Amino acid sequence: MKTTDSDLLARLDRIVTDVVAAHAPTVDAQAAFPKASIDALAQAGFFAVLSSPDVGGLGLGLPTAVRVVERVARACCSTAMVMMMHYCGTAVIEALGPVEVRRKIAAGQHLSTLAFSEVGSRSMFWAPTSTATKVGEGIRLDAKKSWVTSAHHAGAYVWSSKPVLAEGPSTLWLVPADANGLVVGSAYDGLGLRGNDSVPVQADGVIVPESARLGADGGGFDVMMGVVLPHFQLFSAACSLGLMETAVERTIAHATITKFEHTGEALRDQPITRAHIARMRIQTDMVRGLLLDAVAAVAEGRADAGLRVLESKAAAGDTANAVLDVAMRVCGGAAFRKEVGVERLFRDARAATVMAPTTDALYDFIGRAVCGLPLA
């Protein structure tokens, strides 16, 4: 029997409630990879959302994947980040990768990720400084990747380099995580998204066969812009939206149960508190509307799809920070305690504005697009 979108999302609710949410505090406190949550999602078929039925996947497409990421982000944004990077890698592998890896992804046996960000090019992920050199029958890769999500847990990295011989800014490769010459950095211990295992990965003379190339030599930029960027942007917006939804829910809960002893009134009885919460709700709904429209634009092949995709991440990232600022303000000093449940969201929300393409870069791209200029 074919798995439907509604069947999958009903299953997702149970996993998020029983597993993801239960492990989220420990994942954050210990900066631990959310293995139990990722394993549960893999076993329940969520690795296969973007995989074709031809290789045993569900073939439910981008709209369903966006909903999965958003729902997971409501409970644990570290887990959602792992899933969104898996989906980004899967999209490339589905289009250009070997069938045996595609089958493993569909079976929940292969966690994918991207290895684009580099020390040399910073957030300009489309312009790698790492090299790929022809050596005998293989290709030698040398690189200093600065941020690779799931670095210690992925089965392989969708990897960018300069072309071997062709013109163009980049070429893509599928690099096994256990390849000789790869050095994965020490555990991530950061401000937010503390369980996403995003660390530097260095390649020192890593040899891969030419068959590891994903697409044409020199064709990486087109894949980055045409496949990776839309997925990454929409998933990032979904993460931000999930954080906002939970922030609204927890702020309302705190404002409802917290009372002034001398009057018996709850925080929600104050007009200024209600106004703050109303603003949070409106901003969250605005982001949801933009994200849904961006997803529809991509699915329908609309002329404005590229613009909507760029707008979705920029708007969601900035708005999530604004909503979480208000959540901390409404919940007051109690918000600094973990039991209120907003300070983790506050920290996690900060990441969206600095993940490439950064919000500042996106505003420039959007400005160029609406002014009739080329993006680059």
Image: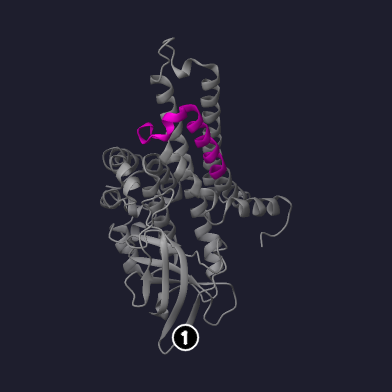
| Residue 255 magenta | no
The quarter of the picture where residue 182 lies is: bottom left
| Residue 330 magenta | yes
Along the line of sight, the residue nearer the viewer: 317 or 112: 317
Along the line of sight, the residue nearer the viewer: 35 or 83: 35
Q: Position of residue 126 (x, y in %)?
A: 56, 65
At x 57% / y 63%, what residue is drawn?
A: 124
At x 43% / y 38%, what residue is drawn?
A: 343
Q: Position of residue 249 (x, y in %)?
A: 42, 29
Tell me: 104 left or right of 200: left
The quarter of the picture where residue 287 lies is: top right
Along the line of sight, the residue nearer the viewer: 71 or 76: 76
Tell me: 55 left or right of 145: left
In the image, residue 33 sits, relative to residue 246, either above or below, namely below
Task: Kindly identify which residue carries mark 1.
Answer: 134
Q: How many marks?
A: 1
In the image, residue 174 sits, relative to residue 312, either above or below, namely below
Magenta span: predominant SS is helix
In the image, residue 135 sits, relative to residue 357, either above or below, namely below
In the image, residue 233 sits, relative to residue 97, either above or below, namely above
Q: Position of residue 10 (x, y in %)?
A: 32, 38
- Please state which amino acid type lies under the numbered disc 1: Lys
User: Dot 1 surroundings within 10 Å: few (below 14), some, or many (20 or more)?
Assistant: some
Quarter holding the C terminus is bottom right
| Label 1 residue SS | strand
Q: Residue furthest bottom?
A: 136
Along the line of sight, the residue nearer the viewer: 371 or 196: 196
Q: Position of residue 87 (x, y in %)?
A: 41, 55
The quarter of the picture where residue 92 lies is: bottom left
Q: Which residues are magenta?
A: 316-341
At x 57% / y 49%, what residue is drawn?
A: 309
